[in-house]
Image (spheres, rainbow, N blue to C red):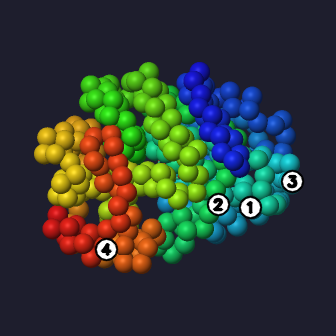
């Protein structure tokens, strides 16, 4: 078992890899526990759940709303969960975002931990303490920073993940390498075949590496005033595409990274050979297979970007494979670029 300790001034979180998720009982109290999951994960894994009441939500982004939070709080009150209670989330990013939020506000905050079941959630969503729900069309606008006590990343659970969801998670894994780890890019290139075959040992190592990158960044900048912005690589165009087309988060991010790579090239930051190499990796992993996005259709959403500051957005560029930096760019310039794609 490998682990990463994510230590911030506010709280600590322990992330474990290669740990059988069914041993989660060792990490939670003996009573006063509530399990939050979704219907898909429950159908597949219910038999291994610890013996506590289970609240299951409808799978999908639409569940990330205040009405789900209210439903969960009502159920928890009815079940008699008190301020010493514990919320155990077993699910992907949607379940972890919701469960982390409800645990943070229920009776002003109770303890919580995650069994992270999707690749996207293992490498990204369950790490770093951002929890929240959506409102109207704005993602994650109601939320808190609060670290789970533990996150279990058991790669054996990824076997049951639908192909699109697996590929969506791969995009965030690749993102970690693109922004921070030149060596990891080479290893992903060499390991492409094993990754696509979901080789457990190979995945475990890459998930560990991605989490290490994210937690190091989060430790140095919990509230996203500087370095943490790098994690938004691919997300400016990606979020716009996700909103317009309703495609999975990671797929949209893959398209956003592809565009941001071109934009970095266009600005003279990346060389031709570097640009080709990165795009080839995106292609070889099948991240954009069957994806067709019209830049003209998504450009309008840039105006509503949550991260905009006046007429500008902090855009994440690559200066070379494995090195990223942030630069403010005018929204009109971003629109002109993306409309030409
Ligand atoms: N908090 C953060 O820092 C952060 C970071 C990135 C993304 N997110 C959020 O994460 C969410 C996306 O996460 P996601 O991609 O995990 O979505 P998700 O939770 O909706 O899971 C994707 C699908 O896979 C199913 N699933 C999950 N685990 C499975 C398994 N082991 N086997 C079979 N099916 C399984 C789910 O039921 C769902 O249908 C978005 O809401 C996004 O905003 C949060």
**Location of residue 56 with respect to 332 vertically, above or below:** above
Residue placed under numbered mark 1 in the picture:
105
Relative to residue 197, is residue 208 drawn left or right? right
Residue at screen point 27% across, 56% down? 260
The mark found on residue 144 in the picture is 2
Rendered location of residue 132, percent (x, y): 60, 61
Instruction: Please identify the quadrant where the N terminus is shown.
Output: top right
Residue at screen point 69% across, 47% down? 9
* Mark 4 touches mark 2? (CB < 8 Å): no
Packing grade of label 3 (10 A; few <14, some 14-19, many >=20) is some
Relative to residue 156, is residue 74 drawn left or right? right
**Location of residue 195 with respect to 217 vertically, above or below:** above
* Mark 4 touches mark 1? (CB < 8 Å): no
Rendered location of residue 91, percent (x, y): 57, 45
User: Does the closest atom of ligand 1 sit within 8 Å of the Cβ of label 3?
Assistant: no
CA gap between label 3 and label 1 equals: 12 Å
Q: Earlier in the sequence, mark 3 or mark 4?
A: 3
Which residue is nearer to you in this view: 85 or 50? 85
Q: Quadrant of residue 145?
A: bottom right
Rendered location of residue 36, percent (x, y): 66, 49
User: Does the closest atom of ligand 1 sit within 8 Å of the Cβ of label 4?
Assistant: no
Q: Earlier in the sequence, mark 4 or mark 2?
A: 2
Instruction: Please identify the quadrant where the C terminus is shown.
Output: bottom left
Residue placed under numbered mark 3 in the picture:
82
- Identify the secondary structure beneath mark 3: loop
Q: Comparing marks 4 and 1, which lies closer to the viewer?
A: 4
- Identify the secondary structure beneath mark 2: strand
CA gap between label 4 and label 1 equals: 35 Å
Residue at screen point 39% across, 64% down? 314
Packing grade of label 2 (10 A; few <14, some 14-19, many >=20) is some
């Amino acid at each position: 078992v490998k682990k990463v300790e994510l230590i911030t001034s506010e709280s600590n979180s322990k992330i474990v890899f290669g740990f059988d998720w069914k041993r989660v009982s060792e990490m939670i109290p003996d009573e006063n526990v509530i399990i939050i999951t979704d219907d898909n994960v429950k159908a597949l894994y219910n038999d291994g759940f610890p013996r506590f009441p289970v609240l299951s939500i409808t799978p999908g982004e639409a569940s990330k709303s205040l009405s789900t939070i209210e439903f969960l709080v009502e159920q928890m009150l009815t079940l008699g969960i008190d301020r010493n209670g514990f919320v155990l989330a077993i699910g992907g990013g949607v379940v972890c975002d919701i469960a982390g939020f409800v645990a943070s506000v229920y009776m002003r905050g109770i303890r919580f931990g995650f069994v992270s079941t999707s690749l996207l959630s293992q490498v990204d969503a369950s790490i770093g303490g951002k929890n929240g729900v959506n409102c109207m069309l704005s993602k994650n606008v109601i939320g808190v920073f609060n670290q789970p006590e533990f996150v279990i990343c058991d790669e054996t659970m990824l076997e049951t993940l639908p192909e699109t969801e697996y590929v969506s998670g791969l995009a965030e894994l690749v993102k970690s390498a693109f922004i921070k780890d030149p060596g990891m890019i080479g290893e992903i290139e060499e390991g492409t075949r094993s990754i696509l075959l979901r080789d457990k040992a190979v995945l475990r190592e890459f998930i560990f590496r991605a989490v290490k990158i994210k937690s190091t960044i989060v430790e140095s900048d919990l509230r996203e005033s500087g370095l943490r912005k790098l994690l938004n690589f691919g997300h400016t165009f990606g979020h716009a595409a996700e909103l317009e087309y309703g495609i999975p988060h990671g797929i949209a991010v893959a398209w956003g990274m592809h565009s941001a790579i071109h934009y970095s090239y266009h600005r003279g930051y990346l060389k031709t050979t570097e640009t080709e190499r990165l795009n080839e990796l995106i292609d070889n992993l099948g991240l954009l297979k069957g994806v067709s996005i019209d830049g003209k259709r998504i450009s309008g959403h840039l105006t509503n970007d949550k991260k905009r500051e006046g007429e500008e957005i902090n855009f994440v560029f690559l200066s070379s494979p494995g090195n990223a930096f942030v630069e403010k760019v005018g929204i009109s310039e971003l629109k002109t670029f993306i409309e030409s794609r």
